[in-house]
Image (cartoon, rainbow, N blue to C red):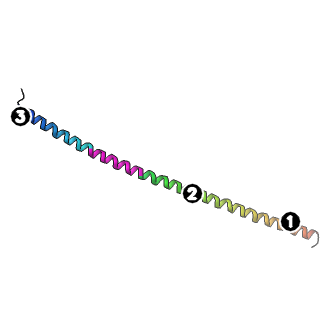
Amino acid sequence: MIDNSGAELIAAQLRHTIDLLRFEVRDLRKSVDYIKEFQEHRLNDLESNGKDHETRIRNLNDGVTQFKMVAGLANGGSGLLSIIAVVKAFFGG
């Protein structure tokens, strides 16, 4: 049979093991919290970059559309001038 001092020794060892496990759990929770915070920060950065790229693409698309419109008007204007020149030449003016 285990005497009283042996039981106290086992109880002390169990308390020590429980304390070590508590510290380990606390450290793991800190690590998980850090990783979670880091991932949230990274996700926010990626979302911000994605929005920035979308804005840039839209601005470029608008610029291309405006350029096409101006080029079309310029091309149409030269065609109109050509027609006026032909009509003027036809009527002898």
Where residue 14 sits, quadrant-wise, is top left
Which residue position holds label 2?
Answer: 55
Q: Earlier in the sequence, mark 2 or mark 1?
A: 2
Quarter of the picture containing the C terminus is bottom right
Q: In terms of secondary structure, what is the magenta stretch mainly?
A: helix
Dividing the picture into quarters, in which one does residue 66 lie? bottom right
Q: Amino acid at mark 3?
A: Ser
What is the secondary structure assignment of the residue under circle 2? Answer: helix
Q: Nearer the viewer, residue 72 or 5?
A: 5
Residue position marked by numbered label 1 in the rendering:
83
Location of residue 50 in the rendering, given as x and y in whole percent from the top left corner: 51, 53
Q: Can you give x and y, in whole percent of width and height, for residue 86 in the image?
A: 88, 67
The residue that appears at 78% across and 63% down in the rendered structure is: 76
**Going 74% across and 62% down the picture, which residue do you hit?**
72
Amino acid type of disc 1? Answer: Ile
How far is mark 3 from mark 1, CA to CA?
116 Å
Q: Select label 3 or label 1 by which is in front.
A: 3
Q: In the image, 33: left or right of 72?
A: left
The residue where tag 3 is placed is: 5
Mark 2 nearby-residue class (10 Å; few <14, some 14–19, many ≥20): few
Front residue (pair 55, 18): 18
Relative to residue 88, is residue 1 depicted above or below?
A: above
Residue 82 vs residue 51, the one in the foreground: 51
Closer-to-camera residue (82/70): 70
At a point 86% along the width and 65% down the height, the residue shown is 83
Q: Earlier in the sequence, mark 3 or mark 1?
A: 3
Q: Which residue is depicted at the point 49% across and 52% down? A: 47
- Disc sitting over residue 56 in the figure: none
What span is in magenta? 26-40
